Structures are given as C-alpha cells and as structure tokens.
Image (tube, rainbow, N blue to C red):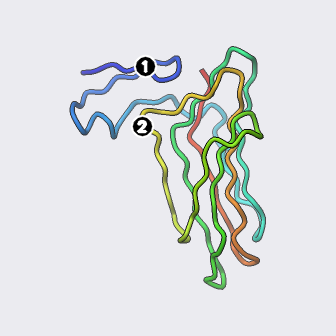
Amino acid sequence: MSKKVYGRQEYQSTLSGAYAMSIHQAPPDSCGSALFDEPDPNTEAVVELACPDAETVNVLGAIYWSYKDLDESVSGGSIGVFSGGSVPVMGLDVVTGGPGYLPFVPPWPFEAGSSIVVHLADAGPTVTGRLKIHAWSE
C-alpha cells in the first residue's frame, strides 16, 4: 500500500506500479449537484467551485462533458479551466460530441484561496452541452 499527498489530503492506494497512477481514493464532491450544468442549446455551460477563505485549497479531480446535437453539427466545442474565475490555466478543443472524461491523476490542487471555474463552450445553435467536475475543498 502506498500513500501520496495531493493538495492537503493524504490518499492511499493498494495498487502498485502503473496501476497506482490510475486509481486514487478521493473525497466526494463537496457541493454535489452544484458542480453540474446543462444549459439550453447554444449556451455555454459553466461550473464553479468557490473558495470559502484564503487558506482553503480547491482540488480538481476530473472533468466530464458531452455535447448532444439535434442536427449533428457540433462545431467550436472547447473546455477552459480558470483559476480565481479569470486566470486561464488550461484549454482544449472538443472535436466530437462525447461523452468525454479528463481525469487529473494526481488530483490538481489550485492556489490557496482560488476558485475553480470550468467552461464548456457553446458549439452550435442546436447543441446542448453537459458539464460536470469532480472537485473538492481542503
């Protein structure tokens, strides 16, 4: 069994080698369904984990997304991750409808006192996007 520290939490893995990188025990989402957004078609999905104080560290474990297109014309899909709401820290293009999943192993701790904001861009007039993040505060 190995122990690793991500952010401020300690996680244990009973696996070793390559498999230890693919599985970790993480706390549940601290806000549950508040970390999910499914807006109307042609609208950006936005999920935010706010930071309650300057000492708290928010941790991002995974991003899940999908696009559902009624006319099969997904275009311009992308995901943006922002620290503190406005500082871009990662962006990627989404070229198919999905679903898609981006795990962070180890989980990605943000700077203390910073919120995590994830955007799923609108991808067309008939496209509905779904966005969920697995994140928590420590």
Task: Give the residue drawn at x 47%, y 23%.
Answer: 6
Q: Is residue 35 or residue 3 the one in the foreground? A: 3
Task: Give the residue drawn at x 69%, y 70%.
Answer: 123
Q: What amino acid is labelled 1 in the image?
A: Val
Horizontal and vertical percent position of residue 26? 46, 30
Q: Which of marks 1 and 2 is nearer the N terminus?
A: 1
Disc 1/disc 2 C-alpha distance (Å): 12 Å
Q: What amino acid is labelled 2 in the image?
A: Val
Task: Give the residue drawn at x 73%, y 39%.
Answer: 87
**Pointer 1 residue:** 5
Horizontal and vertical percent position of residue 74? 63, 76
Task: Give the residue drawn at x 56%, y 40%.
Answer: 134
Q: Is mark 2 on a helix, strand or loop?
A: strand
Query: Neighbour class for label 2 at 10 Å: few (<14), some, many (≥20)?
Result: some
Taking the image as shown, residue 103 lies to the left or right of residue 76, namely left
**Pointer 2 residue:** 105
